[in-house]
Image (cartoon, rainbow, N blue to C red):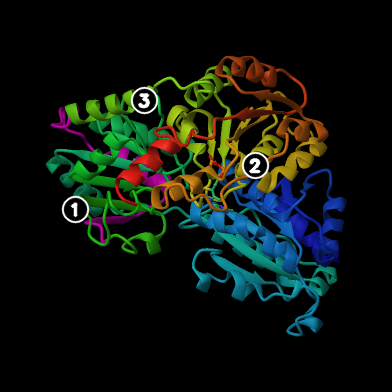
Amino acid sequence: MSPRPAGHVLVEALIAQGVHTVFGVPGESYLAVLDGFHQHREQIRFIACRQEGGAAFMAEAQGKLSGRPGICFVTRGPGATNASIGLHTAFQDSTPMILFIGQVASDQRDREAFQEVDYRQMFGPGTLGMAKWVGEVQDADRLPEYISRAFHTALQGRPGPVVLVLPEDMLTQLSAAPVLARAEPAQAWPAPGALRDLRARLIAAQRPLVIAGGSGWDAEAARALQRFAENWNLPVGCGFRFQDTFDNRHANYAGDVGIGINPKLAQRVKDADLIIALGVRLGEMTTGGYTLITPPKAAQQLVHIHAGPEELGRVFAADLMLQSSMASAAKALEALAAPTSVPWADWTAAAQADYQANHQAPAVAPLDMAVVMKTVQRLAPADTVYTNGAGNYSGWLHRYVRYFGLQHHGRTQLAPTSGAMGYGFPAAVGAALLHPERTVVNIAGDGDFLMTGQELATATGYGAGQGAGRLISIVVDNGSYGTIRMHQEREYPGRVSGSDLFNPDFAAMARAFGWRAALVERTEDFEAAFAQALQPGAPMLIHLKLDADVSTSRSTLSAIRNAALQAGR
Ligand SMILES: Cc1ncc(C[n+]2csc(CCOP(=O)(O)OP(=O)(O)O)c2C)c(N)n1
């Protein structure tokens, strides 16, 4: 291997890992890496974003879609602080991701040099919730070793984000070190004894329920989960924002166990006598604020299957814990011999009937979000990727879109369990750039959209949505940080503070970035606008103006306020 700058070694190492697209905002701290991207521009591209938060969200979305670490490059201090939201989102979603941060030169360290931050302190595993590992590469010859470790760490056990810090002077050192081969995560298998135990518990159950989700799934695992559910006729719910783990069209589907849960499903989770939590952490949103399944010892019998040993027994003292990768767990469950009949056939049928009933919605005028969501799904291709950030508006998407199981089209839901506003739009841009053949539909709130809306420029500049698939953003404008307004009306009825928004003309804004755009204020006008968005051409933003009183898919602000006033708040 002939000597070349470490910045080039880094890019070669990424190519060896199968990376072809990275997202970032450039900085003078890692010019040698940018030069490496130029050197290898036929094999890998650097997407220059408009803010590091957008870049990190695009990389996170890449990680979610591909199951391989999404890659983001940012500069020191200001770049790293901007990118931190994407890192946190990757952590909460268990998404494999690597954030590379340019660092001050080694001979300037610890002087609070220009933009200097100690990233091991800032993101270190000790902060619980930002990164699985933070490494700083001091020696150019060891760069391949650090990159290999970063990929393995991001992928193995509970997947998640890793930070690699790159001192500026290290990146310009010459190194003849060869890069290492592509990292493949080691699989963990459930022990045969534990599987026998699980089977015995299932045989003894009356009202079992599977809650599936988390990361680390692939098409084969999703297929195996479906066959397990069919063999045992089990009802299956999906964890919060992992709605594409189990096919929403399947007769065993019970609905999503997340924010705005179907009240009937919430009751079913409580009534279950055996819960098999498969791949989910059972976080706050999947447990109804830890009320449906209560820690440390749940009222229901709990079998917890997770790839990360540190998650088992951390919050819930489960009756049976299996550390296993999703692929091997699902295959083992599929192979469990099922009885010829089970006593819970009516329970499973009722779970499905509740899900179907929850799909029905009373008509709302003048703009009916349930009809909007159903129209989107009726017209959009089956493999469409749906993205969202945080806000009440996402409730309509979660309730009315029926996600395919990921055995059909891979992941079709990109949504932050971290509840990070601003996620959905850059996630959509990232998805459209990675998969030009797929249509991507982002649903955003008015507050949500303007947190990262500047990535309109990135989409236009790199031709997102210009392949066989379209890129469409639907901005739901209710003139407020509606979720917070809802909470205010509940807790402090009528006392509005800090939640009103002044909004631009979103359609004019999109056009200024080279997008097509339309304003829709009535249900009957939506279908034509969305059909136009599906036609070839520039990406399209549809600005939906919603009555300010519309709050969630289940209630209005005035109803929430009146209920709070009547309750004496
Ligand atoms: C980055 C970030 N900041 C603040 C919040 C707190 N928060 C949650 S929802 C919300 C309002 C969202 O408003 P909008 O996008 O307009 O959607 P709506 O609730 O009105 O449907 C806020 C401020 C958050 N989740 N993320």
Which one is closest to the eye, mark 1 or mark 3? Answer: 1
The amino acid type, in three-letter code, at marker 1 is Ala
Residue drawn at 66 percent across, 53 percent down: 56
Q: Which residue is mark 1?
A: 299
Magenta residues, start to end: 317-345
Taking the image as shown, residue 264 lies to the left or right of residue 518, namely: left
Q: Residues within 10 Å of mark 1 (few under 14, many from 20)?
A: some
Q: Which residue is mark 2?
A: 449
Q: Which residue is mark 3?
A: 250
Residue 264 percent coordinates (x, y): 27, 34
The amino acid type, in three-letter code, at marker 3 is His
Task: Identify the secondary structure beneath mark 3.
Answer: loop
Q: Is residue 188 above or below residue 458?
A: below
Task: Identify the secondary structure beneath mark 1.
Answer: loop
Q: Earlier in the sequence, mark 3 or mark 2?
A: 3
Taking the image as shown, residue 3 lies to the left or right of residue 557, namely: right
Residue drawn at 56 percent across, 49 percent down: 499
Which one is closest to the eye, mark 3 or mark 2? Answer: 2
Residue drawn at 68 percent across, 26 percent down: 470
How many numbered discs, if any? Answer: 3
Q: Residues within 10 Å of mark 2 (few under 14, many from 20)?
A: many
